[in-house]
Image: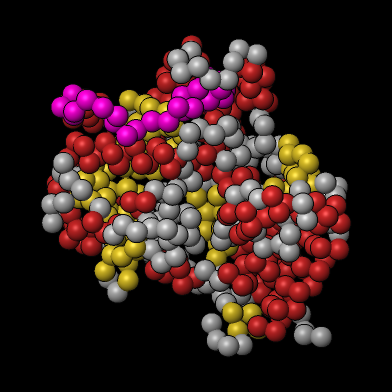
Amino acid sequence: MTDTMIAGVPLDRLENLARREAKRFAAGRPKSKAAAKGAGVFLDGVPLHWMKDWPMPFLPMIALATGARITDIDGYELDDFCLGDTGSMFGHSPEPVAKAIRAQARRGLTYMLPTEDALAAGHLLNHRFGPYRWQIATTATDANRFSIRVARAVTGRPKILVFNGCYHGTVDDAMVELSGGVTQNRAGLLGQFADLTTGAVACEFNDLAGVEAALAKGDVAAILTEPVMTNSCMVLPHDGFHAGLRALASQYGAVLIIDETHTISSGLGGYTRVHGLIPDMFVIGKCVAGGMPTAVWGMTEAMAERYAVAYAARSSGHSGMGTTLSGNPMQFACLRATLGEVMTRKNYDHMERLAARLQAGLAATIARTGAPWHVMRVGARVEFICAPGPLNNGTEAAAAHQPQLERALHTALLNRGCLIAPFHNMMLISPATKTRQVDRLIAAFDEVVSDLFLRETK
């Protein structure tokens, strides 16, 4: 990037695009604009602060979402490739899940006791992801937090090893980063008074030598990692990286925790099942119950035995784990429906086929226009990255992120009927996504990128 160029795009051309697309968005949505004026009841005008990350001048108010389509109150229909940032990866309200919700709503929403759906869901979890001993949470943040507690309990060690630029929900322990090769609290943490480095150490993704150096100190309870870095510009693992993590964790007595919350897009059973990874603990959330807030975390039989010993030895009192509404019957009804009827080989084959089509279409535009960008894919998840690639670690991923350019691109795509995630450039394919929707996104991307790279400035 120079003063006049961002990721190969002349700055004046980018600014013109951003102004034009923002004006187009605002002009076409008078109802949403008027409704947004009443949002002052919420802090900063949004129900949840990350909604401010959307690049539009104001948020469209959604009236309906079905399959892979969203309709706002101004009547605009959008092809949805964000899909709730993976929460609705299997489409909005899959029919088996909607049916399960209707049936369970007549039987009660929460009562802190198990159901037959719970037992069926447990067996389906093993069938889909492997033989673990499971627990239920409401969010992947909680599932990761509880997994970390277990790892510390069974090892008696304080630290969690995470990778620079990672994201595991809002778990404090993971909110560290590397600066000059030294672990420190992440910049920008709100209200954080603790020194998180007393309980965490950061390494670069794909750096096994750095991981071993950290583990050799003997104070690391667990390695917490995604199989692919996803809440950044996407970074794939090098050949042998995950096998190396497994070997190092075993050698140095650390627990290996795999967080599949985003990489469930990789294929049936997630990246772990597809690629034969062998974690001690396994976490998944977001879409696992078809959009109903649900997460699961499991441990191997050997870990369960170690946990039982640690639990039996603890003092009486609150364990500090678990939340009242987790494990409710609605979660289990939706979990059973999703695992049994939605998370199928047929659906994944459809998702991966269209994701490959999307990847190829975006890559063709990048090649034709000469944009110094690249495209990455993991199963049904596709990202275009506004930098050369592939990327190797979190530091490179952070440098590749171009917020000003990405905001303009996202609004321009939305104005052409395509919604992608506000975080980086993530696009998901669902079982409900149609070929024509993918082709519309490719065409919209081609139009916008061609405008940035090929059109003469007027």
Residue at coordinates 50% horizontally, 22% vertically from top-left? 328
Q: Is residue 198 magenta?
A: no
- Residue 108 visible in this rendered orientation of the protein: yes
Q: How many marks?
A: 0
Q: Quadrant of the C terminus?
A: bottom right
In the rendered image, the vertical position of residue 172 relative to residue 183, given as above or below:
above
Quadrant holding the N terminus: bottom right
Give x and y (percent) for residue 373: 56, 70
Residue 345 % position (x, y): 54, 31
Residue 336: say if magenta: yes
Picture residue at 64% right of the left edge, 80% below the top: 9
Name the image colouring. secondary structure
In percent of width and height, residue 11 lies at: 65, 83
Q: Is 277 located above or below residue 389 in the figure? A: above
State the image quarter where residue 24 is shown: bottom right
* Up/down of 400 relative to 294, above or below: below
Camera-nearest residue between 275 and 313: 313
Q: Position of residue 366 (x, y in %)?
A: 62, 69
| Horizontal side of residue 175 vs 70, given as left or right | left
On screen, residue 201 versus residue 102, left or right, reads left
Magenta highlight range: 312-337
Q: Residue furthest bottom?
A: 3
Residue displayed at 71% across by 62% down: 56
Residue 302 in view in this figure: no
Compare residues 113 and 404 and report the one nearer the observer: 113
